[in-house]
Image: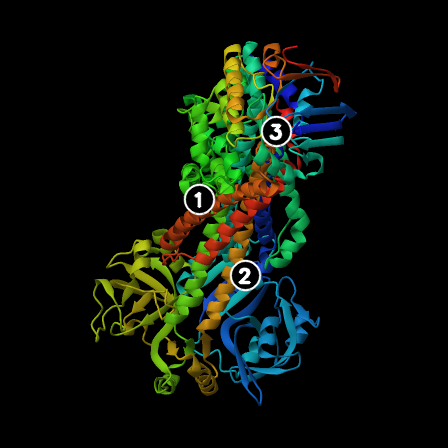
């Protein structure tokens, strides 16, 4: 084979311009652009988090305690290592506005601060006051959404606990907003010393204290973290520093970024179908050239290389266009995106994600073009003398097949390694391959059914329908590429739709039917009798659960650091609720071991949640050390039990024997199951009698979770839309490629007596059948994906969502109709003689 | 004498191309009688095919009048022309022009369906048998030879029993034997159904089988003669 000859042939062929390659370029450019843009935004946010770590955290480093303030020794150590130390108290409470006509209550996350707050950054208030001035005396600032909910204006009064505060300003943005993660209540900031007399920070009350530090410029964060762990690990002190200021946010950005890249890969796969179809159509038009070259003595490999070079050059152009769009879009849209983010982002040119997108582009282009390119070897000179649609294509040779498999493995491997979520990447790749396989089968089934349908006696006389079915089922039709491209795009959208609808229905419809009405926290032991008297004697209350509650951090398992034994399990992340009970609570299901005797007074023992224990590799007899209020309690696991978090009832991973926690100050947690009609009066009475307690209305919490889910679903839907847009490009490409054939068909049909309405109906039916087929298959694959995600990832139940499915099928029909009919106008407008003479 | 089935009066045709307007036909007047077989001959580019297209309403005359069965084709819109062809005309092309996504049977049945024939498929099958393709009815055009494709095209044109059959060099793409067979079939169908046949051809032996021959040159009628003359 002569490479130079192949290169010369390729160059001469490319002189013909980019005609017929617009869809090829668009598909590749769009897929690469989507991945490059998502990757760039992800890196921009990660860089922003890194660069602003201290601001987000509120200091160079922070130590946190649960339930208590720092002891003098701890405070002395902090003062020793830091230039400045600022104390922040953080807890949930109820903000109450008493008016003559009604009393308004709303959940809020209270932040008690000192004079130094904030150490870094500044608090944005409306009106624009210095924070020190805004918090002077018994003044407070709160988030606009909370003030609006309570009907508060600047200057109005509200209560936290039993103390009144004056709203001095609206809190627009605090520099440490993003560090705290998800919270149910909007924030209120007051001075910590102003909370004296509010009755909120009592022994056993749920609160955290954060000590934020400005460290000397030469401070060694690694060494300081090690020192903190060494000196204070048994006191429950938790260290965090500016290297990872918002771990929850970082994790979230990583996950969502990786997920969107995988959605982008689905888009690239759709684009691949378009690329493949474009190359196929291009080579169909080159049959005569290839046959002629063969006649002149060109070897098959020379011709293959010449066309591979052409496709390579065009793919390179498509990838460069995609990279340019992917790099520029985040820069241009940066301010808009940043306004939507709770964290600062550093929008700049990032080479890493662009290189990743380019790699995906190259592999995809090769993967999807080798098969059609291999067809250059099939062309015989005799092909010149056969008109229109040829026979079905044979499989390419072994070398090409091996190369295709190798490319697919390389693409999936790259996605698995580069996304950082190999399991998800492999599942997504499996999903895409499965969907493609299903779609190919479906396309064949659609063609077979259409062929049968066209010959059915029932459609005789319905000329337009018979013609449409015949065209869909006949040789050389566009059924496969349309069902594949549009079907895959719609499949991604259908899967997102099914999962989103299922999650929403589980959270917004099913959960409220089994969940309690209220979660009540911070009930002091002396308030329990009165609390139970009020709640249990209310005819509207069907069930009340009460459990003592403390919070603790699991520090060790069998004497070794917990993270070393159980890895990064969520149970080890931060502090967890701990309860105690002499007897198993009602409905407890012990899966292994035994509950301790009611009068047990021996060394501490515990019952651990069964599923979490298995995930962490725990077994009966293991010793688990929990730091509660600075005291280490080591308890032996004597039983595992079922803990169901899905009903939003009381569920503790850790439950100990009462003696183990005797003496530790604590409060109680309670759930109330009540009729909706009884809820308001209950809340009013409880809040009036016990101003320190916090009642969380579960419906409100569910709404908040739904809001977050809606935002997430929107982000993923945008990603899926990119896939669908690529699918539409492919669709338009298929319609454009088929226009010449439509022109001819319209001319022949008119010649034998078809009026324009009949021709148009035929074209429309043909498009609609393909769109409906793509939609139906997409709903099927989307439902399978939705079922898999709901069953295996969410561990929930799956229910087919017909509305989402209907939307997908209608969307498929609409898209193909628009694309098909847009390219039907020229065929309809031509006079038969012009068309037919041109083909003589 | 009965009215002519086709009557062209001072017909002109000018086509606009990239290089400007080209005058194809210059004031042609011609009558074709019912049941007559008319051959159109002349050198390439003389306007034979264009004239045939005008007779079929496949092309619109720039000037003059084209009457078919007494109806003015130049006054009809595209749909009216299609309906007229559906009821009265069959056209056969040199390149067959079968729809590639349809089987032979479907290609032949389509004009019958368009005409509302309730037994379209039965008649189409009969027609295919008549042209010797009874065993190929479920084959697609790409699975047939040129001669077979032209037979399907003939069956498609003849199936609705048209008053007028228009054939544009129907043997131009075929070898001698196949061409001969197609002409036998074409004349046979014409005899069987009593249609008027207008045939564009380069072949003198075909022209000789026509009742009358019109020779075109440079878009004008150069001569007319009875075939025997």
Q: Secondary structure at mark 3?
A: helix
Whole-percent x, y for residue B168 in the image: 61, 21
Asked if badge 3 and badge 1 are on a common chain, one would say: yes
Left or right of residue A175, residue A399 in this image? left
Mark 2 / mark 1, whichever is N-terminal = 2
Name above or below for residue A433 compared with residue A101.
Answer: above
Marks 3/2: CA distance?
46 Å
Chain letter of the residue beneath label 2 in the structure image? A
Q: Are marks 3 and 1 in contact (CB under 8 Å)?
A: no
Q: Which residue is mark 1?
A: A428
User: Disc number at residue A314?
Assistant: 3
Whole-percent x, y for residue A129 in the image: 70, 72
Left or right of residue A470, residue B65 in this image? right
The coloring applied to the image is: rainbow
Q: Quadrant of residue B227?
A: top right
Question: Residue at point 47% right, 30% down?
Answer: A475
Mark 3 / mark 2, whichever is N-terminal = 2
Whole-percent x, y for residue A247 in the image: 50, 56
Name above or below for residue A476 compared with residue A122.
Answer: above
Left or right of residue A126, residue B146 in this image? left
Q: Residues within 10 Å of mark 3 (few under 14, many from 20)?
A: many
Q: Nearer the viewer, mark 2 or mark 1?
A: 1
Q: Residues within 10 Å of mark 1 (few under 14, many from 20)?
A: many
Q: Which residue is mark 2?
A: A179
């Amino acid at each position: 084979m002569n490479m130079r000859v192949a290169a010369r042939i390729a160059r001469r062929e490319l002189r013909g311009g980019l005609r017929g390659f617009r869809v090829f370029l668009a598909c590749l450019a769009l897929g690469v652009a989507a991945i490059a843009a998502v990757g760039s935004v992800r890196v921009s946010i990660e860089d922003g988090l890194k660069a602003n770590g201290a601001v987000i955290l509120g200091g160079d480093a922070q130590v946190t305690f649960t339930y208590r303030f720092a002891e003098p020794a701890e405070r002395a150590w902090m003062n020793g290592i830091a230039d400045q130390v600022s104390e922040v108290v953080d807890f949930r409470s109820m903000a109450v506005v008493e008016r003559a006509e009604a009393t308004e209550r709303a959940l809020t996350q209270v932040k008690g601060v000192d004079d130094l707050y904030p150490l870094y950054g500044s608090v944005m208030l409306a009106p624009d006051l210095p924070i020190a001035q805004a918090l002077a005396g018994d003044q407070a600032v709160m988030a606009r959404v909370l003030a609006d909910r309570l009907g508060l204006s600047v200057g109005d009064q509200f209560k936290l606990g039993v103390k009144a505060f004056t709203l001095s300003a609206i809190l627009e943005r605090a520099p440490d907003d993003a560090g705290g993660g998800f919270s149910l209540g909007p924030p209120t900031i007051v001075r910590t010393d102003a909370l004296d007399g509010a009755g909120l920070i009592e022994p056993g009350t749920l609160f955290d204290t954060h000590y934020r530090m400005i460290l000397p410029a030469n401070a060694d964060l690694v060494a300081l973290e090690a020192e903190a762990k060494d000196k204070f690990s048994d006191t429950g002190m938790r260290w965090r520093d500016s290297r990872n200021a918002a771990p929850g946010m970082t994790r979230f950005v990583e996950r969502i970024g990786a997920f969107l890249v995988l959605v982008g890969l689905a888009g690239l796969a759709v684009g691949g179908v378009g690329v493949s179809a474009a190359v196929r159509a291009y080579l169909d038009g080159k049959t005569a050239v290839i046959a002629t070259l063969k006649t002149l003595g060109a070897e098959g490999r020379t011709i293959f290389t010449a066309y591979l070079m052409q496709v390579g050059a065009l793919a390179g152009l498509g990838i460069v266009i995609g990279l340019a769009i992917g790099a520029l879009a985040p820069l241009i849209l940066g301010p808009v995106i940043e306004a939507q983010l709770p964290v600062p982002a550093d929008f700049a040119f990032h080479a890493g994600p662009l290189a990743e997108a380019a790699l995906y582009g190259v592999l995809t282009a090769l993967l999807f073009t080798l098969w059609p390119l291999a067809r250059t070897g099939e062309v015989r000179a005799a092909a010149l003398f056969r008109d229109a649609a040829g026979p079905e294509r044979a499989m390419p040779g072994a070398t090409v097949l091996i190369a295709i498999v190798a490319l697919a493995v390389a693409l999936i491997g790259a996605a698995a390694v580069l996304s950082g979520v190999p399991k998800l990447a492999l599942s997504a790749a499996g999903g895409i391959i499965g969907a493609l396989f299903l779609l190919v089968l479906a396309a064949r089934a659609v063609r077979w059914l259409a062929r049968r349908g066209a010959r059915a006696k029932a459609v005789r006389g319905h000329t337009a329908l018979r013609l449409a079915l015949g065209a869909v089922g006949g040789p050389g039709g566009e059924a496969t590429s349309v069902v594949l491209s549009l079907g895959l795009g719609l499949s991604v959208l259908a899967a997102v739709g099914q999962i989103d609808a299922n999650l929403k229905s589980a959270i917004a419809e099913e959960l409220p039917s089994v969940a309690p009405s209220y979660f009540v926290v911070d009930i002091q032991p002396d308030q329990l009798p009165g609390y139970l008297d009020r709640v249990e004697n209310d005819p509207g209350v069907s069930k009340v659960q009460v459990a003592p509650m403390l919070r603790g951090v699991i520090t060790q398992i069998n004497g070794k650091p917990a993270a070393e034994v159980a890895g990064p399990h969520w149970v080890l992340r931060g502090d967890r609720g701990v309860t105690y009970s002499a007897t198993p609570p009602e409905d407890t299901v012990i899966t292994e071991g035994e509950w301790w005797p009611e009068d047990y007074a021996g060394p501490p023992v515990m019952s651990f949640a069964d599923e979490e224990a298995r995930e962490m590799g725990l077994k009966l007899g293991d010793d688990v050390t929990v730091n509660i209020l600075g005291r280490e309690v080591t308890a032996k696991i004597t039983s595992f039990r079922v803990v169901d978090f899905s009903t939003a009832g009381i569920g503790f991973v850790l439950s100990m024997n009462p003696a183990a926690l005797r003496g530790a100050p604590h409060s109680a947690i309670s759930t109330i199951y009540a009729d909706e009609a009884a809820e308001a009066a209950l809340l009013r009475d409880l809040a009036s009698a016990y101003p320190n307690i916090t009642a969380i209305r579960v419906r409100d919490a569910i709404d908040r979770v739904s809001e977050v889910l809606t935002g997430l679903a929107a982000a993923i839907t945008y990603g899926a839309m990119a896939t669908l847009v690529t699918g539409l490009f492919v669709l338009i490409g298929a319609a454009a490629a088929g226009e010449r054939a439509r022109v001819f068909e319209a001319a022949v049909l008119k010649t034998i007596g078809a009026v324009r309405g009949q021709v148009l109906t035929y074209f429309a039916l043909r498009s609609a059948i393909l769109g409906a087929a793509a939609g139906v298959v997409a709903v099927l694959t989307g439902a399978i994906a939705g079922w898999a995600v709901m069953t295996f990832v969410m561990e929930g139940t799956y229910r087919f969502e017909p509305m989402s499915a209907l939307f997908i099928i209608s969307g498929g029909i609409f898209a193909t109709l628009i694309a098909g009919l847009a390219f039907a106008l020229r065929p309809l407008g031509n006079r038969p003689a012009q068309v037919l003479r041109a083909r003589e | 004498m009965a009215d002519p089935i086709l009557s062209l009066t001072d017909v002109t045709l000018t086509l606009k191309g990239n290089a400007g307007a080209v005058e194809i036909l210059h004031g042609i007047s011609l009558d074709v009688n019912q049941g007559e077989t008319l051959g159109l001959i002349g050198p390439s580019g003389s306007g034979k095919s264009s004239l045939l297209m005008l007779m079929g309403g496949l092309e619109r005359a720039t000037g003059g009048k084209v009457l078919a069965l007494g109806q003015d084709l130049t006054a009809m819109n595209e749909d009216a022309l299609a309906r007229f062809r559906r009821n009265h005309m069959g056209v056969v092309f040199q390149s067959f022009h079968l729809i590639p996504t349809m089987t032979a049977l479907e290609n032949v049945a389509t004009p019958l369906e368009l005409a509302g024939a309730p037994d379209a498929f039965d008649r189409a099958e009969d027609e295919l048998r008549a042209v010797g393709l009874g065993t190929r009815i479920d084959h697609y055009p790409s699975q047939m030879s040129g001669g077979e494709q032209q037979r399907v095209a003939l069956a498609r044109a003849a199936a609705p029993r048209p008053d007028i059959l228009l054939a544009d060099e129907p043997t131009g793409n075929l070898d001698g034997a196949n061409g001969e067979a197609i002409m036998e079939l074409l004349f046979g169908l014409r005899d069987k159904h009593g249609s008027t046949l207008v045939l564009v051809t380069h072949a003198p032996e075909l022209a000789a089988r026509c009742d009358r021959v019109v020779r075109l040159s440079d878009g004008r009628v150069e001569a007319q003669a009875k075939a025997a003359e």
